[in-house]
Image (cartoon, rainbow, N blue to C red):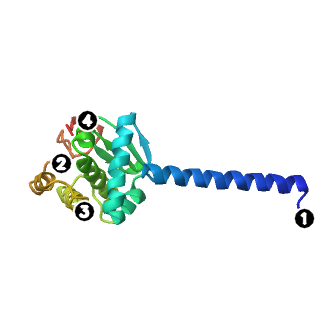
């Protein structure tokens, strides 16, 4: 048997936990962002990312589930990319604000890099990987009703625009990342 004060403490703790779960669920439902995806940036950035995720969740729920599984943080950045080791999608202004559908597509694209990284045969920086991510991005754009101009643009890409080794030293490093302009 528990002492009456212990029983009261346990009941209080249970009430706090229940309230916490309810508040978290309400925030997720209102924002469209699962509580395990952290969005870091200015308010306008956060709103755009939440709307993009809500668009995916509404029109492509299985893609949304995949994104939530592979991305734990989306942050405002000067370049777009996926920091796979941190499960962090970085979003540049051009990727974020071009259009809501483009923003959603870039999130899907970057999350697919993280999904592919879990493969036993994964090798970062290859044009083949980029083509797979472009194809996934295109499929998500089609499912969310993106304009044909965005889908047609993706069809012109073959993955070669992604030259991971920008300085030609045989390794992909932070210097290569900073040499990118997207």
Identify the image quadrant of the C terminus: top left
| Front position among marks 1 and 2 | 1
Q: Nearer the viewer, residue 22 or 96?
A: 22
Mark toward the start of the polypeptide (4 vs 3): 3
Mark toward the start of the polypeptide (1 vs 4): 1
Give the left or right position of residue 40, taking residue 127 as reference: right
Question: Mark 1, residues whose alpha carbon is within 10 Å: few (<14), some, or many (≥20)?
Answer: few
Per the image, label 1 sits on a secondary structure element best described as loop
| Front position among marks 4 and 3 | 3
The quarter of the displayed image where residue 179 is located: top left
> Residue at 35% across / 38% down in the picture?
45
Give residue 109's position: percent from left, percent from top: 27, 54
Marks 4 and 3, how far apart in space? Answer: 32 Å
Question: Circle 2 is placed at which residue position?
Answer: 162
| Front position among marks 3 and 2 | 3
Question: Circle 3 is placed at which residue position?
Answer: 143
Give the left or right position of residue 130, taking residue 15 as reference: left
Identify the image quadrant of the N terminus: bottom right
Mark toward the start of the polypeptide (4 vs 2): 2
Question: Circle 4 is placed at which residue position?
Answer: 178
Marks 1 and 4, how far apart in space? Answer: 63 Å
Marks 4 and 2, how far apart in space? Answer: 13 Å
Number of residue marks: 4
Question: Circle 1 is placed at which residue position?
Answer: 1
């Amino acid at each position: 048997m528990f002492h009456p004060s212990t029983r009261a403490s346990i009941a209080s703790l249970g009430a706090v936990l229940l309230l916490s779960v309810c508040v978290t669920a309400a925030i997720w439902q209102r924002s469209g962002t699962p509580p395990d995806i952290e969005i870091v940036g200015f308010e306008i950035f956060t709103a755009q990312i939440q709307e993009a995720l809500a668009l995916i969740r509404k029109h492509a729920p299985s893609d949304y589930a995949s994104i939530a599984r592979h991305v734990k943080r989306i942050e405002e950045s000067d370049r777009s990319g996926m920091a796979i080791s941190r499960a962090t999608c970085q979003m540049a202004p051009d990727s974020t604000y071009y259009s809501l559908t483009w923003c959603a597509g870039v999130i899907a694209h970057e999350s697919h890099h993280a999904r592919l990284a879990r493969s036993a045969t994964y090798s970062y920086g290859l044009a083949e990987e980029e083509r797979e991510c472009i194809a996934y991005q295109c499929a998500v754009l089609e499912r969310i009703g993106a304009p044909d101009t965005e889908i047609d643009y993706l069809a012109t890409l073959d993955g070669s625009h992604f030259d991971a080794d920008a300085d030609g030293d045989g390794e992909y490093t932070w210097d290569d990342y900073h040499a990118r302009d997207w």
